[in-house]
Amino acid sequence: MERDSMEFDVVIVGAGPAGLSAAIRLLQLAQDKQHELSVCVVEKGSEVGAHILSGAVFEPTALNELVPDWKDQGAPLNTPVVEDEILVLRNQNSSIKVPGLFVPKTMHNQGNYIISLGNLCRWLAEKAEELGAEVFPGFAAAEVLYNDQGQVEGIITGDMGLDSQGNEKDGFTPGMELKAKFTLFAEGARGHLGKDLISHFNLDADKEPQHFGLGIKEIWDVDPSRHQPGKVVHTAGWPLDESGSHGGSFLYHIENNQIVVGLITDLAYSNPHVSPFEEFQRLKTHPKFANILSGGKRVSYGARAIAKGGPQSLPKMHFPGGLLIGCDAGTLNGAKIKGSHTAMKSGMVAADVLFNQLSKGADYGVDAAEFQSEFESSWAYQELYTQRNFGPANHKWGNILGAAYSFLDINVFNGKLPWTLSDSTPDHAKLKPANSSPKINYPKPDGILSFDRLSSVFLSNTNHEEDQPCHLKLTDESIPIGINLKEFDEPAQRYCPAGVYEILEEEGSKRLQINAQNCVHCKTCDIKDPSQNITWVTPEGTGGPNYPNM
Ligand SMILES: Cc1cc2nc3c(=O)[nH]c(=O)nc-3n(C[C@H](O)[C@H](O)[C@H](O)COP(=O)(O)OP(=O)(O)OC[C@H]3O[C@@H](n4cnc5c(N)ncnc54)[C@H](O)[C@@H]3O)c2cc1C
């Protein structure tokens, strides 16, 4: 069957903050300058927002520029931050509050809002559509469309209706070619097309490797007497410090007597017995969490990687026919644990650059190289640059000493110290052998504050057509039960927050089972597999989690 093909001026992959801000800005410019422009946004989730998972304390800087009257237009920013609290958890019972004077200024949240980023994206998509964007949810961009010269000419959406062996079922529909003069890749952290483009155009030459964290999050309905709307709590220390791992937690009092709570585990951890999922479950048993959650009801669960390497890891963001924006490139500010505002700004700068090119008559294959300097002179990049040493300092010296260094670097010297710390070992290369790493005995879930993976995945409303090709590709089928099992006790069993990877023993021999239908699209396996043997590709469009308000 022939593929259908459609043509646009700009195709945008991903309806997250970066992609939608780019669409809005492009069409605002087109309206202002009375220049006709066709913009299409493809989104793999069943609807916009279905795959968005964030904290989120939102800094409205970029939104103020993009839609200055967002309040009047009903943007879902309903809970201003009223209080920040930073705690160091010393062990499973005790904690110390960090005095305000010693709190890094990146962690001050006055002027910010606690939001559901998924709901903000739904609202941004409405704005983009009002301006004339064609937003196609349920369409995964499965491949980059390269021309004979290796330039980008758009994308191919995923085939629908293949069985697990790749044979066509009844109702098979081949993916469509969506061609565009420019394609913006805005897939978020560890985008699978972004990964392909970085390798195809060697965009990360001379850059530090990208670094990641895995964020696991839940939403709870809690007793109103325990709820303080607008309160923001961050913690470091226990439980991750017991295994020498790094990361931190968040607990935000959002509207409607809900609490969002989560743990970001730095994926540079070295003990292969670590299970980020179980670390998060025991975190909630700490009195600082239990006192708020007790008597409440967990209503939602999800997980997503964050890209937090900072400017040292930011690849070249332009190539013939397209740009890489937002967390697909790695524009998150790790010191603030915020990436929505910088992702939005990268999309807005991209729109300015592409509109300029298109109004000059740019055709296929143009490399809008000026995007790099335009982005680097924006406030978003300046912010990343002044806080560039935060991540490497944490990896070198740990959360507490690293934070002390960052306090001096950022609060005292305003990021102007004349050096840039390096962090050159990729996260997947950090694991130590299992037999020389201390085992961790995680407590059994109590079903009140802590839960197992399967009941958690159930709350992510994850759904995939079961009879389709597995979207988690192994380069070498023998590695999981070979070197990975021998050296690292196959860590996929523990780092996957959705129970996708299981080692089963049958008649004395072991085999890997991949429960691809559970996958919440967090991308951790693609990042952390020590043999870099797992490649995450898009399943059929609409597959994956269905987050209501993550
Ligand atoms: C646990 C956690 C807590 C966080 N807390 C905060 C916070 O408090 N404040 C803050 O500002 N930031 C926070 N962040 C970071 C923030 O969420 C990201 O920086 C931001 O979402 C990046 O926006 P983006 O548009 O680049 O990508 P995303 O928001 O990831 O959006 C990408 C979109 O593209 C879609 N997509 C991906 N691939 C394809 C494809 N091939 N085809 C079609 N569609 C595709 C995805 O489904 C998704 O909808 C947090 C992140 C996590 C995980």
Image (spheres, rainbow, N blue to C red):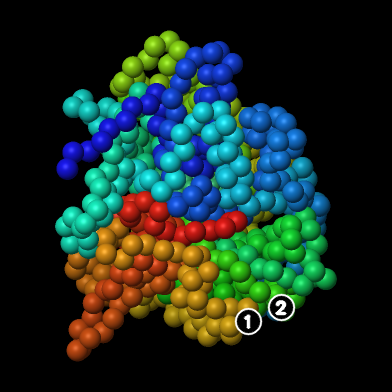
Q: Amino acid at mark 1?
A: Ile
**From what the image shows, is residue 339 above or below residue 376?**
below
Quadrant location of the N terminus in the rendered image: top left
Image coordinates of residue 12 in percent, x first then y, are 43, 35
Residue of label 1 = 448
Q: CA distance from mark 1 to mark 2?
A: 8 Å
Nearer to the camera, 463 or 436: 463
Image coordinates of residue 495 in percent, x first then y, are 42, 67
Mark 1 CB in 8 Å range of ligand 1?
Answer: no
**Label 2 crowd bin: few (<14), some (14–19), many (20+), radius 10 Å:** some
Mark count: 2
Q: Quadrant of residue 530?
A: bottom left
Image coordinates of residue 246 in percent, x first then y, are 55, 62
CB atoms of marks 1 and 2 within 8 Å: yes
Which of the two discs, 1 and 2, labels the residue nearer the N terminus? Answer: 2
Name the residue rendered at 54%, 13% in the picture: 34
Nearer to the camera, 40 or 493: 40
**Label 1 crowd bin: few (<14), some (14–19), many (20+), radius 10 Å:** some
Nearer to the camera, 111 or 434: 111
